[in-house]
Amino acid sequence: MGDPQRPVRVEVASTPEQRARGLMERDRLAADAGMLFRFDPPAPAEQGFYMYRTRIPLDIAFLDADGRILDIQTMTPCESRVAVLCRVYRPGQGYHQALEVNAGYFRRHGIRPGDRVRPARGDTCR
């Protein structure tokens, strides 16, 4: 299991507009930062993420209702100027949240599917 106390400061994207924008157009992301995407109702397996207009290589962890990591994938920036030509990253099952961090973050910290993401200091992930 990965480091149980590995903190990440996240921006939360809970509205459709925030989720659509995500980390687009950014040139960097702090080493301990990320973006948490919340879905209510949960996102179906067919719904995924793409890297259109996203400049930073990212890891994405798809989470269940309890914050358990279902799948981790590394996403690379899409060079196309046409969104539909960008690869879509899907976990293969429904999910409640997704956490994006810099590419390689999960591997460097030994974080794997089955590990759990928990909020700090009583904050809530829901």
Image (cartoon, rainbow, N blue to C red):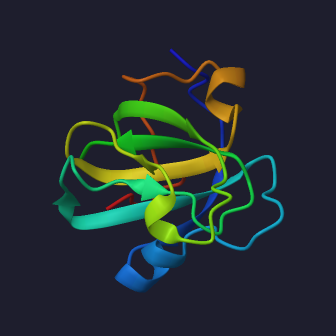
- Whether residue 123 is visible: no
Furthest-top residue in this view: 1
Residue 65, image x and y in percent? 24, 47
Q: Based on the displayed image, in which of its 4 quarters is residue 16 positioned?
A: bottom left
Asked whether 81 or 125 is in front, the reply is: 81
The structure residue drawn at horizontal position 51% and vertical position 43%, both measured from the top left corner, is: 60
Residue 32, image x and y in percent? 75, 48
Q: Is residue 120 above or below residue 16?
A: above
Q: Is residue 20 left or right of residue 106?
A: left
Q: Based on the displayed image, in which of its 4 quarters is residue 2 positioned?
A: top right
Q: Is residue 87 above or below residue 35?
A: above
Q: Is residue 56 above or below residue 17?
A: above
The structure residue drawn at horizontal position 63% and vertical position 56%, both measured from the top left corner, is: 78
Asked whether 94 or 34 is in front, the reply is: 94
Q: Is residue 14 left or right of residue 46?
A: right
Quadrant (top left/top right/bottom left/bottom right) for the C terminus = bottom left
- Whether residue 53 is visible: yes
Q: How many marks?
A: 0
Residue 54, image x and y in percent? 66, 63
The structure residue drawn at horizontal position 21% and vertical position 39%, both measured from the top left corner, is: 93
Q: Is residue 78 left or right of residue 62?
A: right
Asked whether 108 or 4 is in front, the reply is: 108
The structure residue drawn at horizontal position 49% and vertical position 57%, both measured from the top left corner, is: 50
